[in-house]
Image: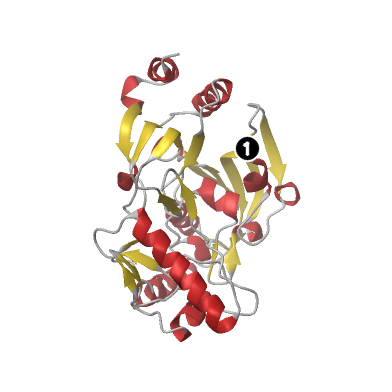
Amino acid sequence: MDLYKELCSILESENVLREEPMSKHTTFRIGGPADYFVTPQNEEQVRDIILLCQKEEIPYYILGNGSNLLVGDKGYRGVVIQIYKKMNQIRVEGTKVYAGAGALLSKIAAAALAESLTGFEFASGIPGTLGGAVMMNAGAYGGEMKQVLESARVLTSEGEVLTLTLDELNMGYRTSVVAKKGYTVLGAVIALEKGNETEIRACMEDLKNRRVTKQPLEYGSAGSTFKRPEGYFAGKLIQDSGLQGFSIGGAQVSEKHCGFVINKGNATAADVTALIEHVQNTVEEKFGVRLETEVKRIGEF
């Protein structure tokens, strides 16, 4: 089977790339080539691509903005399906926001602000898309997606479209039924409340300033590298282990915020992996706490 031809029969050929460097599609700016990189324009194309990959037993990975991802230096053997700019519709009706999986959280927050809707301020600076945020129950500054989600439309691996309520999404700390069952998010309904536009804007500005002053936004990274261990803060454990600014190759524990591993310039996935393991081992040795990564890893390392 000629997979390229099959993919082009589902998509326009310009939306099917071969040997595409994943460093162009992750906020870490790291990653070797994906065999195939496709950008579906609608839900039917997403379903048809997934069903094709399953039929031919070809690995596939659903990508949004690539903001929580480390791709191996040797790349990804299979099909990367990016649900992003072509499926990013946002519509506000009353106090509800209807958005496609490819919509950036920052754009949803801006749409909510324009309608004086409050509740989504916490997500205004998270660099990911709605699909990824639903899958991992993304959160920041005391807020998380499960506080504002009403429902989500998902695609099962069998190609069935389901609408799941908040309870059915079974959202926990950085997880959901979407992650556990390998569903693909197509869109979601976010339920907010009427608020004061000036206060909402002020809150978003405050969170933005806190991010700029406390996070290493000037460097490539995948955001917060480690999950928060119960009873601790990952960044403080790392700092107290004397690892602030510690580097391996082009990867460094940020001097600004120890919870971030950053790409100082030419970091490889191998550099990042080695640094993460060194941090985990050092923290465990000093404090008896094994840090878990929040960043997803795909591809060949």
Left/right of residue 246 with respect to residue 89 in the rendered view: left
Query: Which residue is at the far left?
Result: 265
Q: What count of labels does the image hold? A: 1
Q: Nearer the viewer, residue 126 or 247?
A: 247
Label 1: state its secondary structure: strand
Which color scheme did the rendering employ for the protein?
secondary structure
> Which image quadrant: the N terminus?
top left
Is residue 224 visible in the rendered image? The answer is: no
Q: Which residue is mark 1?
A: 154
Q: Quadrant of residue 37?
A: top left
Residue 213 placement (x, y as % from top left): 35, 77
Residue 38 placement (x, y as % from top left): 40, 30
Residue 115 placement (x, y as % from top left): 50, 55
Left/right of residue 218 with respect to residue 275 in the rendered view: left
Left/right of residue 218 with respect to residue 108 in the rendered view: left
Tell me which residue sits at (63%, 26%) in the image.
159
Above or below, comparing residue 181 to residue 110 in the picture? above
Tell me which residue sits at (53%, 24%) in the image.
44
Above or below, comparing residue 120 to residue 206 in the picture? above
Is residue 181 visible in the rendered image? The answer is: yes
Above or below, comparing residue 50 to residue 255 in the picture? above
Residue 299 placement (x, y as % from top left): 44, 43
Above or below, comparing residue 248 to residue 62 in the picture? below
Q: Nearer the viewer, residue 284 or 31?
A: 284
Tell me which residue sits at (38%, 19%) in the image.
4
Answer few, some or many: residues within 10 Å of disc 1's Cα (few below 14, many 20 plus, some between 14 and 19).
Answer: many
- Amino acid type indicated by mark 1: Val
Q: Nearer the viewer, residue 111 or 82?
A: 82
Left/right of residue 290 with respect to residue 70 in the rendered view: right
